[in-house]
Image (cartoon, rainbow, N blue to C red):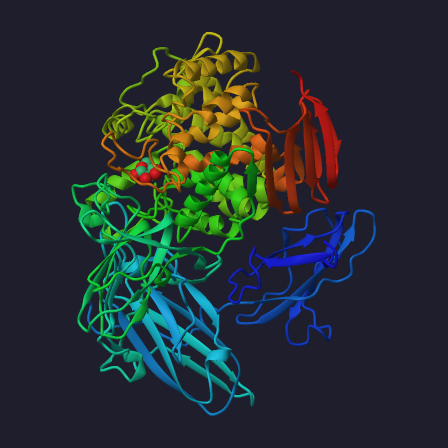
Amino acid sequence: MPGEPPVTDLRVDGLDGPLGLGNARPVFRWRVTGAVGQGAAEVEVGPEAGFDAGARWWSSGRVVSARPFGLRYAGPPLPARQPMCWRVRVWRADGTETGWSAPARFETGMSAAGWCGRWITAPDPVAPATWYLRTEVALPGPVARARAYATALGWYRLLINGVDLTGPALVPRWTPFHDRVEYQTYDATASLRPGVNVVGVIVSEGRFRGRLGGLSRPARYGDLLAALLHLDIELADGQRVTVGTDESWTASRGPIRSSDPKHGERVDLRIPDPLGTPGARRVQVLEPHGRRLIAEDVERVTEIARLPATISRTPSGVVLVDFGQNFSGVAEILLDGAPGDRVVLSYSEVLTPEGELDTTYLGDRDPARWFQRDEIVLDGTPVRYRPTGTIHGFRYLTVEGLPEPPAAADVEGIVLSTALPETGRFTCSDSALERLHANVVWSMRSNFTDTPSDCPTRERSGWTGDIQVFAPTAAILADVGPYLRRYLANLAAEQLPDGRVPVVIPTEAAPGRIGLPERLFRAMSSSTGWGDAAVILPWTLYWYYGDEDVLDRQYPSARAWVEYLAHRAATRRGLARRFGRRTGPRERYILDAGFHFGEWLRPGESLAAQLRDAVLAPRAAVATAYLAHSAQLLGRIAAVLDKRADAERYTELAHHARTAWNAAFVRGDGSRIGDDNQDDYVRALSFDLLPTDQRAAALSRLAELVETAGDHLGTGFLSTAMLLPTLSRNGRPDLAHRILRQTSPPSWRAQIDRGATTLWETWDGYDGTGKAHRSHNHYALGAVAGWLHEDLAGLRPAAPGYARIRINPTPGGGLTHASSSVCTPYGPATSTWRIERGQLHLVAHIPPGTTAEVITPHGDNIQTGGGTHEWKWLLQR
Ligand code: RAM
């Protein structure tokens, strides 16, 4: 781009100018523009004051590296609350120098000892209740600079002189709250003024005390909501004022009576805003509780889009708002009625066959568990209402209690999601596939709000299996590095001492509050395919972002999981050793003990039968395959980290597990594996478990199974993401296209034809009567969007961080055009193909500093470097 500076997009730990950095050794990244990539780089870091005049605390020196990322600070320890600057210069591969970039800012966060505030709580634990905590701060003169460090047990909003500094952020995010709570840092400079300032913190249930998980149980971490604030003010005359939460603060109830993250908000607008005057009661200071405070290291949840509404009435006459898109967020709506009118807003993803709002489709035994509802009592003044302290998963909304329905222009859908830069674009000649891609993006947005969740409506839990299968696709669609690193930090924190990994992260209860349901859940922590997230996720982040740091940080966790599996296999035998053959000493590598979800929910399989098998007869062919796969990956991780003995140990373990798996589950020449389901062959080929000479037989059996099923997929939760790549990368792209084009269920197109705007948990979404069932916003089956980019359009990494790129389009399925563009750590890359007059016309943009191998339709391999390249090949008839 003309005029673009040679070095741009400076990021610290993946974030743009973070204010409260907690990492003592931050990692820098940038982007090099222009045609020639980086050969070496130098980073300089210094205090903001004096940086322009040359103040420096550290320089990396000239580091020879083609990678514009991963350069780690190694200077003197950074003091807390320190405004810093950094800049970078690059020597291109041709020896030319870019000159220094414009400086970028960051600031370090609060030290553990630096907090002047103490945790304060409202006087009595009434659940649920929203509390308004307040103090006044008198300032003798104008403010030069102010920072607020804040957090809560619950969700909070910080208001200074009526200005809401937190907005829709939904903080603090969900962590193992018994152990650690994240704080936010705000620039409060512009909100404070000379004279009296009102500082308020509104605290609601949040994830700390709100309803969580499959049973929607409240108060899983504690009974008392609390807040902590430290306000650091520098006046223009150099004086410093520090304000913290303490016993002088007051507490009141206010118009927001209560908010629950799942069940919505109760508001009485007749009650005045209590932050205007001192509250009636004093707060109490919490007893010391030992929770660690950690800096936020992820982009906040924010409003990422607004959706227009259409308004109608249901057959029974209720006002119905349709946003035309399933999403996570809230609605903003003009409420105009008489004082005392009670308005009820109810939310759902779906309608009943009769056209009413369906609030029972997630399970009708106890539908109240899934209520998403806001209730507002009006004070007679028209108000643009928007709930806070809650988030809904919905497309439809009913409005009850207003004398007149609102006009469409007076209602908007507010889409809330983590502010992740979206990096993957896909287009093609088939609008249904474009819609499929868009649906996957919507499901990702909807579930990437706090912890990555399975669905935004029902349990809203951080299922490990779901993110394990979806992460590679997520890494194409958005810059999810920091977001998934935080998930992994939580995972490591909650891993059990024996290495097992809880199936939901965070685990949804403090250790002191573990009851029977939590104990049952804990029994699932041995499940392969789920717990393997401990190994597969770090590897995914390394593969897509070249992030070695995450491998290092997660190494103990990844290793503990693999060691657990290996130990379990060696020492325990499952209730039903299902394989007929005895394999002698190799049996110590067969994993069939403990709970395993298995492939989970193949089309047509019932939930009850699956659960029974998961406990009584876990499929050893699935579990042992994951032992081999994760051990192999761990061996590679150890090699990257230069842990040679471990690299050898885990590569060998993988070898033994593979040999045992072959001996136990493969018959003949590879044409019969395990239970002879599609996924048995997909795993075998995708995890590279078979001897080379058996791969062809396995592939042809897989093809046969797909064809016998009428070109339908038969894979479940774990293998669906791998099915199409397995076919197209092993010589059957035609079959991959046929599965993708399939219009009857189970298929992605059946969902699209049925009007889906997000991915569903089940293939059909509705029963024969048209009644919806199960979640309509689950990203797991949406991992197929990865295939659209990497195989159909043909753009994928061939080395970690896209240092080497493979361009290998998979035309077919009657398509005449497809294009993928992604933002690699080296810069944007694209692969676009078009079929014209019997020719395949390919345009590839390869970022500077990387190389590419381009596979022609005739199987040739062309090597190329950075830049935009075009080819035309005659396609065979
Ligand atoms: C469902 C969840 C999730 C899956 C588990 C096993 O309840 O929605 O998607 O990981 O089951």
- Looking at the picture, tell me which residue is in the foreground, 332 or 175: 332
Q: Residue furthest right?
A: 95
| Image x and y of residue 817, in percent | 60, 32
Left or right of 765 on screen, residue 821: right
Task: Measuring from the top left, give residue 654's x and y in whole percent.
Answer: 50, 26
Give the image quadrant in which the ligand numbered 1 is located. Answer: top left
How many circles with numbers are drawn on the protein? 0
**Can see residue 179?**
yes
Write down the quadrant of residue 43 in the picture. bottom right
Q: Residue at x 69, y 30 (%)?
A: 841
Against 570, residue 287 (above or below) is below
Q: Is residue 597 left or right of residue 423?
A: left
Q: Is residue 696 left or right of residue 768?
A: right
Is residue 532 in view from this perspective? Answer: no
Return the residue nearer the eye: 456 or 547.
456
For the point 25% across and 42% down, the residue is 362
Q: Residue furthest top?
A: 668
Q: Position of residue 308 (x, y in %)?
A: 40, 55
* Residue that protrudes farthest toward the bottom in the picture: 140
